[in-house]
Image (cartoon, rainbow, N blue to C red):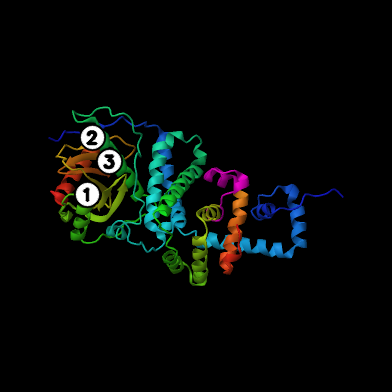
């Protein structure tokens, strides 16, 4: 009989995982018959794998979590949502920048991209915004996050309600994402970043895929708004909501 | 002061359908990424941040994805890289996993038959090294084969196999309650 290479520990695992070359299968099976303690051990590994698959397969978003207080107390309130990040859109050179500092425009473009990504995540499967805390608490959290005094008011006169809010880490600083929902159940998200010295500017559009994002600055704030509405409509609605919220 | 049509900032995006489909495909992977991030980090807030970093990187680098069929591996690879990076900086700050809190929440969400198992398993998985937890999650939860694990973690397949053997041995020892007997 030809000598057969000894069975290695890794081959036992490969057998368990269905990764063993067919040529070695018979040898491993013979080995396991002769080594019941190894066979039992493999069986235990198999059971552990099944348990991991079952216990750890729940969608993360659905697992009730204790969110330990981290950098901000506010984080324990809002969405179980991976809010978002940058550059959802192909970012390129800034084509036109309306007489402003180019660096500033780049930062507004970045803000717009972050806002768009955050919006997409919010509207992805399995993510539900949670009810927010009181307007007073939101205002306080926003003020301390953004480094400027913000006083939110109830925008419901516009037909839109606040449905969620979140502090989003962003580079060195932090941004605030705020979602409102309208009469047709459509969601519009605002995205704010503190920007000392900023003054009111017109709304401008960030080019994007299937989403409209408008950016502007207000006193000490850089702002973005995102939805699927077409630009002109979003500007009209967004301005109305913004004025009701913060005006 | 308001222009009648908001003006575009930035270059017009490539509006090809492929690009848009890729964005849609990336978004469709978010629940999986979120789940994986949560079981890696044992913490919702950290998981959110991980997915955020991952999405940011993926969207900005999506032009570099050669083969859209490998999107999932590619995303998981980015996520796992961020996880290890974050872990290293947390270790420097002396942060550790919140194993007991997480075990409680996992047990609470398990069926009553599985409650004790969920708690034991969450504790044991939490005590594993990050690399061992990674590999067990990819294999058992995500259903990856050895080659996919190797691609995702950027390690040779031989390393996958030896690491897997150690991870299983260590997990078993933790579950049996005699972790000190294990020498890696």
Q: Residue placed at 49% from the left, 44% from the top?
A: B77
Residue B155 sits inside the magenta stretch: yes
- Give the magenta part as a residue range: B139-159
Which of A149 and B1 lies nearest the eye of the viewer?
A149
**Dominant SS type (magenta):** helix
A219 above or below A70?
above
Q: In the image, which disc is placed on residue A111?
A: 3
| Chain assignment, label 3 | A
Identity of the residue drawn at 14% across and 35% down: B2
- Percent x, y for residue A80? 35, 57
- In the rendered structure, the residue with mark 2 lies on which chain? A
Report the chain holding disc 1: A
Look at mark 2 in the image and give the residue it sits on. A104
Q: Position of residue A101 (x, y in %)?
A: 21, 31
Residue A24 visible from this viewpoint:
yes
> In the image, A145: left or right of A25?
left
Residue at mark 1: A146
What separation in Å lies between label 3 and label 2 (alpha carbons)? 10 Å
Towards the viewer: B172 or A166: B172
Q: Marks 3 and 2: same chain? A: yes
Q: Is residue A167 magenta?
A: no
């Amino acid at each position: 009989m030809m000598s057969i290479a000894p069975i290695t520990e890794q081959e036992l695992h490969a057998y368990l995982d269905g990764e063993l070359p067919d040529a070695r299968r018979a040898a491993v099976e013979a080995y396991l018959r002769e080594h019941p303690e190894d066979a039992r051990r493999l069986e235990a590994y198999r059971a552990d794998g099944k348990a991991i698959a079952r216990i750890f397969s729940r969608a993360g978003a659905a697992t009730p979590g204790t969110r330990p207080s981290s950098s901000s107390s506010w984080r324990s309130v809002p969405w179980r949502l991976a809010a978002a990040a940058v550059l959802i859109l192909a970012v390129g050179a800034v084509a036109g920048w309306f007489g402003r500092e180019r660096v500033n425009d780049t930062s507004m473009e970045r803000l717009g991209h972050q806002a768009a990504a955050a919006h997409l995540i919010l509207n992805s499967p399995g993510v539900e915004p949670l009810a927010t805390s009181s307007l007073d608490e939101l205002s306080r959290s926003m003020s301390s996050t953004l480094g400027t005094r913000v006083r939110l008011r109830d925008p419901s006169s516009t037909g839109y309600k606040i449905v969620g809010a979140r502090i989003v880490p962003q580079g060195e600083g932090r941004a605030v994402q705020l979602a409102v929902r309208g009469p047709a159940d459509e969601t519009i998200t605002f995205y704010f970043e503190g920007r000392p010295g900023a003054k009111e500017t017109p709304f401008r559009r960030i080019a994007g895929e299937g989403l409209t994002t408008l950016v502007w600055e207000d006193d000490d704030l850089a702002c973005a708004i995102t939805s699927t509405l077409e630009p002109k409509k979003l500007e009209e609605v967004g301005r109305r909501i913004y004025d009701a919220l913060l005006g | 002061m308001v222009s009648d049509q908001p003006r575009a900032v930035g270059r017009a995006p490539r509006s090809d359908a492929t690009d848009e489909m890729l964005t849609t495909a990336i978004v469709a992977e978010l629940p999986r990424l979120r789940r994986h991030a949560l079981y890696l980090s044992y913490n919702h807030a950290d998981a959110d941040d991980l997915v955020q970093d991952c999405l940011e990187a993926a969207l900005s680098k999506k032009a570099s994805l050669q083969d859209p069929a490998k999107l999932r591996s590619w995303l998981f690879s980015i996520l796992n890289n961020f996880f290890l990076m974050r872990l290293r900086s947390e270790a420097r700050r002396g942060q550790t996993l919140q194993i007991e809190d997480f075990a409680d929440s996992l047990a609470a969400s398990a069926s009553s038959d599985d409650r004790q198992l969920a708690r034991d398993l969450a504790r044991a998985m939490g005590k594993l090294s990050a690399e061992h937890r990674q590999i067990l999650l990819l294999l058992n939860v995500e259903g990856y084969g050895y080659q996919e694990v190797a691609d995702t973690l950027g390690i040779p397949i031989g390393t996958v196999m030896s690491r897997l053997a150690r991870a299983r041995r260590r997990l078993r020892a933790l579950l049996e309650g005699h972790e000190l007997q294990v020498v890696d």
